[in-house]
Image (tube, rainbow, N blue to C red):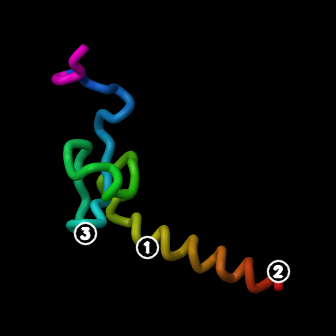
Amino acid sequence: MSLRGRIDPVSEGQWWFCLKHMRVEPDKGCPNKDRMGPYASEQEAAGALQRAADRNKAWDEADEDDD
């Protein structure tokens, strides 16, 4: 059974941040192993690295509080 040409409604209109090219991509782009997402909008995908940095900082601070 071929899935070529099949439209997946779950991924339709989703955006990703490509870690290889450091840019926002639509669903059709680099392999998911090289991307962060999916995000509902291009703007959300553009903020992926900052969001990850903010979360990492919060987790690091929480770990320090546990010590």
Q: Residue furthest front?
A: 1
Q: At label 3, which amino acid type do we have?
A: Met
Q: Which mark is residue 22?
A: 3
Q: 53 or 13: nearer the eye?
A: 53
Q: CA distance from mark 3 to mark 2?
A: 34 Å
- Image position of 66 with respect to 28: above or below: below
Mark 3 or mark 2, earlier in chain:
3
Q: Is residue 23 left or right of residue 10?
A: left
Q: At label 2, which amino acid type do we have?
A: Asp
Which of pointers 2 and 1 indicates the residue nearer the eye? 2
**Mark 2 Cα-neighbour bin, 10 Å: few <14, some 14–19, many ≥20:** few
Which of pointers 3 and 1 indicates the residue nearer the eye? 3
The answer to whether marks 2 and 1 mark residues whose Cβ atoms lie closer than 8 Å is no
User: What SS does tag 1 mark?
Assistant: helix
Most prominent secondary structure in the magenta stretch? loop
- Image position of 36 with respect to 21: above or below: above
At 25% across and 24% down in the image, what residue appears?
Answer: 7
Q: Is residue 48 left or right of residue 4?
A: right
How many numbered discs, if any? Answer: 3
Numbered range of the magenta stretch: 1-5
Q: Which mark is residue 50?
A: 1
Q: Specify whether residue 24 is painted magenta.
A: no
Give the labeled residue for mark 2: 66
Q: CA distance from mark 2 to mark 1?
A: 25 Å
Q: At label 1, which amino acid type do we have?
A: Gln
